[in-house]
Amino acid sequence: MRYISTRGGIQPISFKDAVMMGLASDGGLLLPQSYPTISREQLEGWRSLSYPELAFEVISRYVDDIPAAELKDIIDRSYATFSHPQVTPVVKQDGLYILELFHGVTLAFKDVALQFLGNLFEYILVERNQKLNIIGATSGDTGSAAIHGVRGKKGISIFILHPHGKTSAVQALQMTTVTDANVHNIAVHGTFDDCQDMVKALFGDLEFKEKYSLGAVNSINWARVLAQVAYYFFAWLRVTDSGEQTVSFSVPTGNFGDIFAGYVAKRMGLPIDKLLLATNENNILTRFINQGDYSLGEVVATVSPSMDIQIASNFERYLFHLFGDNPERLKNAFVELKEQGRISCHENEMAQVRRDFCSASVNQAETIATIRDFHAQTGYLLDPHTAVGVKAALDLLAADSARVCLATAHPAKFGETVEKALGTPVPLPESVLELKGKPTRCEIMAADLEKVREFVVAQVG
Ligand SMILES: *Cc1c(COP(=O)(O)O)cnc(C)c1O
């Protein structure tokens, strides 16, 4: 399998090169040249597979430059870190199926992709005798999952900037209690935007970027999307095991990575009935799907902060397919977005969008009410991101199809909001309680680019 760019500016490259490239060098996103298809018969044959075995079946169809035994080992090690024997179990609550994606080390679904990506990076770097220095800014979720994905790995150092005192308590603990020599937490006296601006400035300094082999872990890496495709297959198999005939998925969406993985699963032949894209008040994608209106608004801070995004970076991958895999049409659309703040689509394109997705936007009051009501009816705790998807599923998906809601974070990770909804504190899981009192390591710094640069240089040596 070879990989191409949505902007059409690179020659096809191998899987390993696609992983190391991250963002395509022409500014586009990387995609496989085609999607392998899985027949119904093959799918039926996968019912008895464990999660890692199934993930291998899905992932290996996109990888032809890593020997099967090595790829299997990478996948096995990635999912051995999950605390549930089924890795991503499906539970039934009050007529809905909840796909629990939060049994990884940082209690959010990003672990599914970042455990895999960390092991992949290490494998490729060791093989190529190269080094990678990952630098990123986080408001909490991605940074902690990335740190845990690469801690102790050969060839990699990671520097994660977070706004000092502005992440949740659980998120700060998950980052700063990692004291491996290759992990560098930087707490900045400033905002998340200050952190992000400094990271952008470091990447913008091409000489520095080259000299210190800087890399990113943002959600546009193809390997992250690929790892997520596996759980759509896993969930479909579990739900149909229990006798359901048709299956729909509701996906709380921010950067469009998770739901794009569902779209890929569908393209591979997984019989998904509806893919429901759920947003919070940052609802540009819902407006687009329902009204054809892709115009940028201001980012609103909500109780589901990992979905507080206006420009969903992975959406470019879908647009490329929507535009008939035509890079010129895609580039024109982005020029229009830059110049006029919007993208317009033809009627036939919008008809296709509505065949691919349905969508609903859920506001904060509805999110909190959903956490409360669902708990009252079932005793089950939803985190605010998951609650957005559950509310959208209850409103939009008919009950004659099995409704699978992706649970993207453990309720304790966003305990403040869940407590607000219920009036009682959320019990912390064992893995979080263990972090309290552990030694921590974190560099506290002014929001000063030169200080950050000096620190990176001193550590990398
Ligand atoms: C990142 C994240 C999301 C959004 O996922 P995308 O792939 O960016 O659409 C939803 N919920 C939680 C808890 C997240 O961390």
Image (tube, grey):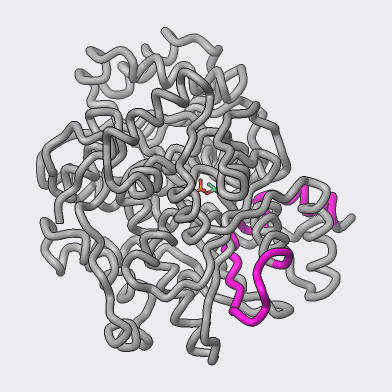
Find the residue positioned furthest to the front.
347
Question: Which image quadrant for residue 92?
Answer: bottom right
Quarter containing the N terminus: bottom left
| Drawn side of residue 250 relative to residue 222, left or right | right
| 136 relative to 226, above or below | above
Q: Residue at x 21, y 60 (%)?
A: 62
Residue 173 seen anywhere in this rendered image of the structure: no
Q: Where is residue 234 drawn, in percent x and y?
A: 43, 75
Question: Which residue is situated farthest in the bottom direction here?
Answer: 243
Residue 268: quarter of image? bottom left
Q: Is residue 139 left or right of residue 211?
A: right
Position of the C terminus, as image quadrant, is top left
Residue drawn at point x = 57 percent, y = 38 percent: 140
- Figure check: 317 above or below 206: below
Residue at 13% across / 48% down in the picture?
14
Image coordinates of residue 283 in percent, x first then y, are 64, 41
Number of numbered discs present? 0
Image side of residue 238 versus residue 426, left or right: left
Residue 354, percent across and down? 52, 57
User: Is residue 109 in sight in this rendering?
Assistant: yes
Asked whether 434 falls inside the magenta stretch, the response is: no
Q: Is residue 396 magenta?
A: yes
Residue 205 is situated, as x and y percent measured from the top left of the image, at: 30, 12
Q: Is residue 74 left or right of residue 178?
A: left
- Furthest-right residue in view? 423
> Quick check: 265 above or below 289?
below
Of residue 279 and residue 429, the one placed in the foreground of this image is 279
The part of the chain drawn in magenta is: 394-421
Identified at 62% across, 38% down, the residue is: 308
